[in-house]
Image (tube, rainbow, N blue to C red):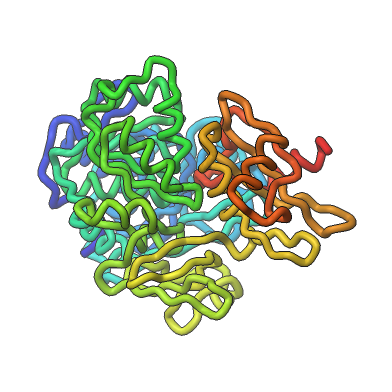
């Protein structure tokens, strides 16, 4: 099934998308998509052609995805905070037939892109349904350094993932999702466009994360479901004016990232009044592990879930997680990157983990190992011990270059009541942990800085620690 057909088959509703207080019906969204598709066709876009676009979260983003698939074209969203250098690298890899950007976006400056408003008018017939293995999406990963990788997904892979997530999460058209993550991120696309669009679920969009505003929206819109990193939900619980009654409509939270600790899951479940479960995935392999909404609570708390359908995991001799399944990306745009990461049908994730009776627990990244005086230290493991401290809400641990030892352990913590190096060392000593694991630099921060992907900016924090030594 193509993505256009998947979305077109959903029940209609009068408030499919809520954007900045405005409500758009299914008919209005469909009409906007068809009109935008006609505008794209007028620029020469046809089936199989790539369309790059850079717009904030909002109706324009939803419309552009739908318009691309209406034509059988390949949607290539760029994060609205992606800078000029990364935009240029992405466009160079992609070679798009058309570029669309909101005024002031780097893509507009780099390519002379048309604006969404300039594409409206007219109508376009929907393209014949694409083959399941036809390209549907190019999504760019982003980091603190280096060129973004273009990740290619197919219609069949994404459509199958959507149907599976609806079943696993127990979602239907009566649910309401709040989506603050960028729709140019795989989580935002899945849970802000595709999953709700497939069943006619109301989607409430935010263009920027703001805990106070999110509380207002959850309460006013009766939001039942959210996806995101722990920092979103910690922000809700710590926001002025928070009370459990304001989030009473929430029933399910799905959280990803190595910072999803049992302590966080327990607190969020207790204070937000929802089922909180861990999930695992990436741009290349979206939500390849999670638990069902009715799985045993201890599995939701202590593991990152299990695969469903035809998805498989294996752990190699270096403890790296390899995954294969229909939802895994087809390739990178760069053939060399493809050859390095896609091997005999398996995708090498770069993540470390272990399997216990089919349940996956992610233990870190290949690159998160800190080598101090010849000793290997897992940044993820140190973070888990820090977050177990009652004063610490969140922690990010990085390696700090050291001339004598190679690296030292540096910790950044969100601790509203205070937390210093002496308290940190005492905590590790009380827990009977080896001395070399304990951080030698501790800094309290107001919030964890995030990359456009929603992951902690570890490189930026490492640079910050080095500058302050």
Instruction: Between residue 461 and residue 339, name the one nearer to us.
Output: 461
Which residue is at 73% across, 65% downward? 375
How many numbered badges does the structure rendering display? 0
Q: In this view of the protein, can residue 126 be seen by the observer?
A: no
Residue 313 lies in what quarter of the image? bottom left
| Quadrant of the frame with the C terminus | top right
Which residue is at 56% across, 48% downward? 385
Which residue is at 53% across, 43% downward? 452
Instruction: Determine whether 8 is above or below 375 in the image.
Output: above
Coordinates of residue 443 in the picture (x, y in percent)? 69, 34
Instruction: Between residue 322 and residue 375, name the one nearer to us.
Output: 375
Q: In the shown orientation, is residue 414 left or right of residue 402?
A: left
Q: In the shown orientation, is residue 454 left or right of residue 121?
A: right
Instruction: Between residue 357 and residue 116, name the one nearer to us.
Output: 357
Residue extending furthest toward the top: 241
Q: In this view of the protein, can residue 281 be seen by the observer?
A: yes
Instruction: Determine whether 452 is above or below 325 in the image.
Output: above
């Amino acid at each position: 099934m193509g993505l256009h057909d998947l979305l077109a088959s959903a029940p209609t509703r009068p408030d499919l998308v809520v954007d900045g207080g405005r409500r758009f019906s299914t008919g209005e969204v469909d009409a906007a998509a068809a009109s935008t598709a006609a505008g794209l066709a007028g620029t020469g876009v046809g089936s199989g052609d790539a369309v790059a676009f850079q717009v904030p979260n909002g109706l324009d983003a939803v419309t552009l995805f739908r318009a691309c698939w209406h034509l059988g074209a390949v949607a290539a969203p760029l994060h609205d905070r992606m800078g000029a250098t990364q935009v240029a690298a992405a466009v160079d890899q992609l070679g798009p037939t058309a570029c669309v950007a909101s005024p002031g976006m780097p893509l507009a400056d780099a390519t002379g892109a048309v604006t969404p408003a300039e594409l409206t008018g007219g109508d376009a017939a929907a393209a014949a349904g694409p083959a399941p293995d036809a390209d549907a999406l190019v999504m760019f990963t982003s980091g603190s350094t280096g060129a973004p990788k273009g990740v290619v997904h197919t219609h069949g892979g994404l459509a199958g993932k959507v149907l599976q997530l609806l079943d696993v999460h127990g979602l239907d058209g009566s649910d309401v999702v709040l989506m603050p993550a960028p729709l140019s991120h795989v989580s935002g696309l899945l849970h802000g466009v595709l999953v709700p669009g497939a069943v006619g679920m109301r989607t409430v969009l935010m263009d920027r994360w703001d805990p106070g505003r999110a509380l207002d929206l959850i309460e006013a819109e009766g939001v039942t479901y959210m996806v995101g990193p722990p920092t979103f939900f910690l922000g809700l619980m710590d926001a002025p004016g928070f009370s459990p009654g304001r989030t009473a409509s929430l029933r399910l939270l799905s959280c990803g990232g190595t910072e999803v600790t049992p302590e966080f899951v327990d607190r969020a479940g207790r204070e937000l009044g929802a089922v909180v479960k861990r999930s695992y995935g990436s741009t290349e392999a979206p939500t390849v592990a999670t638990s069902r909404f009715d799985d045993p609570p201890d599995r939701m708390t202590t593991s990152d879930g299990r695969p469903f359908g035809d998805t498989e995991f294996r752990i190699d001799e270096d403890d790296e997680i390899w995954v294969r399944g229909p939802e895994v990306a087809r390739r990178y745009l760069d053939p060399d990157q493809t050859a390095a990461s896609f091997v005999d049908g398996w995708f090498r994730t770069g993540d470390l983990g272990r399997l216990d009776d089919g349940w996956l627990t992610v233990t870190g990244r290949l690159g998160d190992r800190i080598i101090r005086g010849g000793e290997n230290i897992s940044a993820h493991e140190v973070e888990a011990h820090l977050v177990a401290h009652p004063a610490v809400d969140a922690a990010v641990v990085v390696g700090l270059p050291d001339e004598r030892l190679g690296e030292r352990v540096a910790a950044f913590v969100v601790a509203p009541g205070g937390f210093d190096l002496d308290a940190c060392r005492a905590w590790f000593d009380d827990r009977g942990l080896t001395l070399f694991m304990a951080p030698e630099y501790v800094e309290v921060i107001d919030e964890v800085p995030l990359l456009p992907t929603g992951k902690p900016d570890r490189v930026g924090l490492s640079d910050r620690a080095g500058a302050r030594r």
